[in-house]
Amino acid sequence: MRAAVYRRTGDPSVLEVVDRPVPEPGPGEVLVRVAVSGVNPTDWKSRQGDGSGAPPRHGWQIPNQDGAGIIESVGTGVDAKLTGERVWIWEAAWQRPWGTAAEYTVVPVRQVVRLGSASFDLGAALGIPFLTAHRCLTVGETMPDRLDVGALTGRTVLVQGGAGAVGNAAIQLARWADATVVATVSSAEKAQLAVAAGASYVVNYREQDVVAEVRKIVPDGVDAIVEVAAARNAEIDCQVIGANGAVAVYADDGGASLTLPVRPLMMPNIRWQFVLVYTLPTVAKAHAVTDVAAAASSGVLRLGAEAGLPLHHYPLDEVARAHAAVQDSAVGKVLVVTSQS
């Protein structure tokens, strides 16, 4: 099989496409013929490493956590009836060398989810962004543990950075659950993307006063904030979060240090919650996978510019360019086409 591999960490040039034997699924595993591999920031950050050029933990690594394809075979202990199923994959490369940037990958059976008739592109876009967004929308004290139609009725969510992949996922999931969604963006073009995703209101933070605009929409403050740049937006978040609300921080796009005013946040019982999808509590991860799968199978999750998430396709031979695009903050979803499944 053809696979993208890196044997030392570094810039995208460390990636090479090589021929490798097709792996055999072990006990509890499935072999997936990958059709599309999704690229996320965590993928290039893992590939880049700490700057020392050290080898990855297994000596070699096929990158990319997310993907979609068809189950080719199963290991012992796995129902053989799964063979031939169209599936999406989450966390393929987490503490394992077998990522999705290859024609085949092996993963534990619990990390594949039936895709049904949805496109492989959608399947490859679900993992990290949508599971992260689900946690951000459910972690608050007054928020539900599960998402479904009507689960967020009467609640208002602020999505900081509504044109990013997680921001887009948060908007789509929140609207599916019937929340009012306010999204912040940095340009008119990104405002159009947030609206296409389903945002109820959009605020251009370069041209508008975010606090004033949000307070016009919801005078008592929002119930939850999905936060991409905690240090940069902390002052705004403190002024727009409502009583018993939660700020879910899933990225560090605004600086490494965060300073918060204790008393103003203590009085209304505000929660700041940091979110990393890989180390979520087991129950929260299971809920996220189940709910995202339900949303996908119901047809409410969308891709493409018309859904606020432009697609950028690369062939497997250009995986380095795909990683560079994500590293350079390409707007939209970067996908690597790995086979003709």
Image: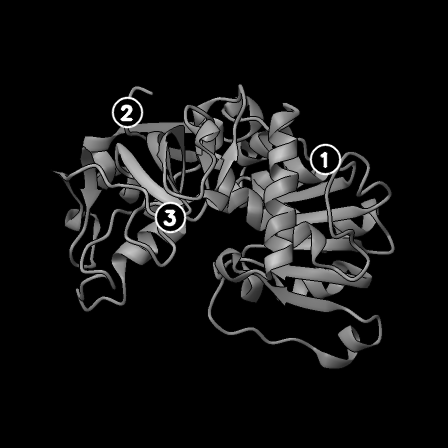
* CA neighbours of label 2 inside 10 A, class few (<14), some (14 to 19), many (20+): some
**Please, what is the three-letter code of the amino acid marked with disc 1?**
Arg
Q: Nearer the viewer, mark 2 or mark 3?
A: 3
Could you tell which of marks 1 and 3 lies nearer the N-terminus?
Answer: 3
Instruction: Tell me the quadrant of the picture where the C terminus can be found.
Output: top left
Q: Give the Cα distance between marks 1 and 2.
A: 33 Å
* Element assignment for label 3: loop
**Residue 140 falls in image quadrant:** bottom right
Decide which of 21, 299 is in the foreground and name it.
21
Residue under pointer 3: 27
**Please, what is the three-letter code of the amino acid marked with disc 2?**
Ser
Name the residue: 59% across, 44% down: 289
Residue under pointer 1: 175
Name the residue: 57% across, 26% down: 302
* CA neighbours of label 1 inside 10 A, class few (<14), some (14 to 19), many (20+): many
Q: Which mark is residue 339?
A: 2
Residue 69, percent across and down? 39, 28
Decide which of 114, 303 is in the foreground and name it.
114
Decide which of 319, 181 is in the foreground and name it.
319
Is residue 21 at all visible to an observer of this figure?
yes
Name the residue: 68% across, 54% down: 225
Q: Are marks 2 and 3 in contact (CB under 8 Å)?
A: no
Q: Which mark is residue 133?
A: none
